[in-house]
Amino acid sequence: MTRTAARKTSRWTAIGAVTLVGALALAGCGRSDEGGGAGGDSAGEAIDDSPATGELTVWAMGNEGEVLDELVGQFEEENPDVSVEVTAVPWESAHDRIATAIAGGETPDITMLGTTWVGEFAATGAFEPTPEGLVDESAFFEGSWETAVVDDVAYGVPWYVDTRVLYYRTDLADQAGVEPPTTWDEYTEFTKALQSAGATWGVSLPPGGFDSWQYVTPLAWQQGGDILNEDGTEFTFDTPEWEEAFTYYKSFFDEGIAEPRRLEGGEIEQAFINGEVGAFYSGPFHVSLLLDQGGEEFADKFAVTMVPGADSRTSFTGGGNLAVFEDTDNRDAAWKLVRWLSQPETQISWYEISTDLPSVQEAWDDPTFSEDPYLSVFGEQLQDSKAPPAIPTWAQVSAVIDQELEKTTRGETTPADAIATIQQQAQSIGTGK
Amino acid sequence: MTLTAWLFALPFVVLFLVFMAGPIVGSLVMSFTDMTTRDLQTPFQVDIVGVDNYVRLFQDPRFLRSLLNTFTFVVVAVPLTMALALAVALALDKGIRRFRTVYRVGFYTPVVTSIVAIAIVWRFILQPDGLLNGFLGLFGIQGPDWLQSTTWALPSLIAMAVWRNIGTLMVIFLAALQGVPREHHEAAMVDGANAWQRFWNITIPAMRPAILFSAVITGIGFLQFFEEPFVMTRGGPLDSTLSAAMYTFQQFGFGNYAYASAASYVLFLAIVVLALIQFRLLGRKED
């Protein structure tokens, strides 16, 4: 009896101690009014033209992480006193690793970033704003430059770009006697015609789920709609443009043009090659995948075209950015490497190594791109492509769009209710400022 | 004397404090703040918001949905796994004579196979033109698109989880079955008890500790149901397979650290409550 009581007492003492420690830890808390991070940051000194020196660590993800070594070898040749170490980080863990590095103060000098992460990490104050005069802003595609800008301050530069175009079966289109679509009306007719020529589904669209916002958002952009208002303070989902975008997207499922099923990676190529799917949206990497899997003769059976549109033919753009950390010990060399990586010549050799598309417009004048039947379309599309706003809460807001879009295509809600819900939830999540 | 004891315990105590107790207390404290990604560099400059996060959690229909899904999963999958594992263990203990090792390995393999490989195989089984629907087709039944149907996605994942976890419990039950004293069975047989009566009155009571242990570890494991939805459905379609652990993971991914910590403490409390209930129901009766 006494023993149990004693044990109980000591347990309560332990809990008390824990609470006390917690309270003490919290006593030092409280958000300062200035609110660190993005906003008040001003760019550091300009970067001169002298050769880079010292050591640099660069984090890069996926394929880029594996082949970047080859490219920076050239930088090291041009700048004999610099040594660059590339660390490959898998995409799946990259977001968390950057977050952990920032929290622990153990950041590399430079990191590659998914374009949609800039807003979130810039808000921590871990990135240095791009120095004045380092690069010419207008040299980049407008849509991708904006991915690096948070509250009018640029953090790093866009490194490579990615955009979606429409892949379609030319043989089916010829058989049905239709031309690639430029408007929404033509687009519906076109996909129906592909079905009449033998495709089970005119176009493949995800009915919802992870990242399906990337398919519906361009439809709103094409009518002049947007995610945020002009000064970036309020969400604008409850607008006629968004309702129209949802209605139009849903029509593909209602009319039986698109399969109400999400094709996972690997399924879409096969369905397109065997003619089950007449058209789909994707980035540049699908060209080589289709040529590999469909064989040489398949090259005559498909083509790419700019996405059809309403007022504009805007597509979605993503890609990778480069950012320099505030904590870097070798600031000048870091920015020199970033500047070098955004030179047109570097970006052309980078394409040859990695097949990443240049973010700098001038590089596209090179015959590698301008004379390629596929790449030239991507170049054209990049002139009219847009990225979501660089706000810290975007991942969370976009998940709501994914969710409501799925409810809409499954007929569980109407476009009007869906956008009302998105607006209401987005407002409660906030823009993170 | 005491000092020496502490000295010997020191390696464990230090590791425990730094890597276990520290983070646990840290995340508990964090759940009462408004910490998000923006505070990564200045983790102590956060505001204390009391139980706000917990209140918000219970106002979030997605979190409530995830609790319901998790609850359904545990209530269906725990008894199902235990019953099937017991059946398999009995069959291997008494019924099956030939190829016993082959069966044992066969039932245990899913436990040690990587979830990634399992996901690929189960996709082949569950896709609309997959093995399962092909099999149903033989009887003229048109099966649904299992993983993308709001009705069938959760049952599909339950089936998968049960299949993955039978092996562990089977091993525990086999060991327990072999520990049931022969004499008790013989005595019961002398008294004229049939096989069913002996199973119910001798085998089961003798296995009570093993059953309790299995119920607790399976219950705890299943409450943290995560891998199956993560690799198969990402919580979809329409959150029908969103588990509480999956929801917490998503919130961490969004950078809502404080909110996600609160969600994980709700799950932790649920685990404690479940374990207490199981001990009460299945624990040794007080003499």
Image (tube, helix red, strand yellow):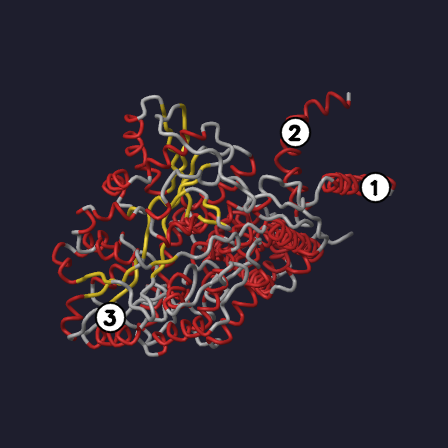
Which residue is disc 1 drawn over? Answer: A9
1 or 3: mark nearer the eye: 3
Q: Could you say where residue A331 lies in the image, as x and y percent from the top left?
A: 45, 30
- From this viewpoint, which residue is outermost toward the right? A2
Residue, disc 2: B14
- Residue B13, placed above or below residue B42: above
x and y percent of residue B32 in the render? Answer: 69, 50
Say which element carries label 2. Answer: helix
Determine the CA span between mark 2 and mark 1: 24 Å
Q: Are labels 1 and 3 assigned to the same chain?
A: yes
Q: How crowded is mark 1: few (under 14 residues within 10 Å), some or many (20 or more)?
A: few
Q: Can residue A83 be seen in this view?
A: yes
Examine the rendering and report whether any part of residue B76 can be seen.
Answer: no
Residue at 55% across / 50% down in the picture?
B255
| Displayed quadrant of residue A248 | bottom left
Residue A259 position in % (x across, y down): 33, 71
Secondary element at tag 1: helix
- Distance, label 2 to label 3, CA atoms, is 67 Å
